[in-house]
Structure formats: C-alpha cells, structure tokens
Amino acid sequence: MNKIHICKSSDIPSNGMKSYDVAGGLKVLIANAGASYYAYQGICPHQEVCLDEGFYDGSVLTCHQHLWQWDITTGAAVGLAEAPLESYEVKVEEGEIFVMRASALKVAELFVGVSDETLERLNKIARREEHKSGSTLYDIGDSTDDLYVLESGRVEFMIGRDNRTSAAGFVLVKGEVFGWAALLDHQPQRIAKAACLEDSAMLRLSGEKTLQILESDPVSGYSVMRKLSGLITRLITVPVGK
Ligand code: FES
C-alpha cells in the first residue's frame, strides 16, 4: 500500500468536496460527510469529466455532464450511473488526510490469481517511476529488459519506422501491463514505441527477475502465462486504427 498525503481535513468544506492532482497523474476527489471523509477517482467513469465540477449534497455525488450519481459512503452507482467509483481508503491523522493506494500489481489483470506471497516478491522488485506527458518510455529497437504496470495516466503505442510511425490503435489505462515482451523468449527488441499521453506513474519490473519469481511458484507462473497468451491474442486481433 502507498500512503499518499492529500490535504488538511480543514481544506474540505463541511459536506463538500474538492479534488487534488496527485503526483503521477492521479486525480483524487475528497468528500466530507459529517465526521467522515471519502476518497474517489476524480474523473467520471463515464467520460473525461472532473467530478468536482458536479453537485454534491453531503450524501449523493452527481456528475453534471450526464447526471450519473453515486452514494458518497460507498461509491456505488445510484440511478442512471452504470459504473461505481473507484475508491481509496482514507486515513486522517492529526488533521491531515492521506489516501492508501493498493499496488498497481494487485489490480493488474495479468497478476490476478497470483499468490499473495509471490505478489509481495514481485512488489519488492518493482521500481515506481513517474513520467511527464509526452515522455517516451521506450522506442522501436530498444531492448526488452523490463515490463511495466501502469498505475495512473495513459500510455499510447506507435508502430512503424522513423518519421512514419502511426498510432497502434490502443491506449492503456490503469492496471494494464505493457512491455510484456520482457517475459518472452526470442523477443530482444521492442517492436513499438510507448509514450505517455499525460503525466503517468508506473511500476517497472525486470523481466528476468519476474520470470525467476514466477518459476519458483509454478501455479502463479502458469496463471500469468495463460493470461499473457490471452492478452497477446487479444492485441494481435485488434485491427489497427480501432
Ligand atoms: S461524463 Fe459524467 S455522467 Fe457522463
């Protein structure tokens, strides 16, 4: 768990809300309801709209754009809303508000099914990195040493050569894994360029060390490899431009 300082409790109006940009491109909405504080994703799960521009009456949060609503105590969808809000555990210590964020590894689809012990070992070898919007993470032809798990922000992929690169047709969001060629044999070079579309944070893991850990826990390793093969199949069947 990462403990992230957000603000003072006195910064949040009684039965009101405010949103904060946290390092790594994460936007967090903090809401007060009586004696309690709640933390949710700051962007509407429907479209890219800031939830602090919506309405909040101390119990229900409403996005002003299409009127999706959520129960502030749980983040559960109410009425028209088709998706809940992602919530974060809140700690208030001496008047300071912190949110606790689970490791991106914990929510990454690739690692669902991995034992807690192996996940902890993977967490230990993961390095957290933050990159500005527009940064290139790797380019075509670079070596495939590491894989990445996106924690926040968005990453786009380009394929092609020199100035003739074009979007590969997909953009990754939180919890998605990329650079997974680091887990494959005979894939020494990147075949796409990865760049941040906005300020982004990610975990970076050595492919070699990840494989060593997975080989020592064959059940978890088998689960990861099955999911990886499904991921590759999905990607190669996505037509370019979609
Ligand atoms: S953008 Fe928020 S409900 Fe549509």
Image (spheres, rainbow, N blue to C red):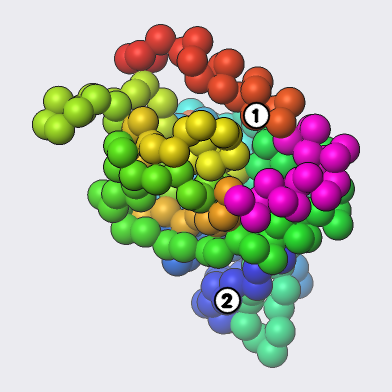
Q: Residue at x 71, y 78 (%)?
A: 92
Which SS does the magenta portion mostly show? helix
Q: Is residue 219 left or right of residue 135?
A: right
Along the line of sight, which residue is nearer the eye, 216 or 42? 216
Q: Dividing the image into 4 quarters, which one contains the N terminus?
A: bottom right
Where is residue 134 shown, x and y percent of the image? 26, 49
**Per the image, is 220 magenta?**
yes
Estimate the spatial distance between the alpha carbons at disc 1 and disc 2, rounded to whole Å: 35 Å
**View extreme (front): residue:** 186
**Image quadrant of residue 2?**
bottom right
Q: Position of residue 119 (x, y in %)?
A: 77, 54
Instruction: Identify the residue position indicated by label 1 in the image.
Output: 228
Magenta stretch bounds: 208-224
Q: Position of residue 114 (x, y in %)?
A: 81, 43
Residue 174 coordinates in the image, percent (x, y): 55, 44
Return the residue nearer the eye: 99 or 82.
99
**Residue at position x 86%, y 57% in the image:** 117
Asked if the stretch drawn in magenta spans residue 45, the answer is no
Q: Residue 185, relative to residue 16: is it above or below?
A: above
| Depth check, front residue: 187 or 94 | 187
Q: Say whether residue 208 is visible.
A: yes
Residue marked by disc 2: 5
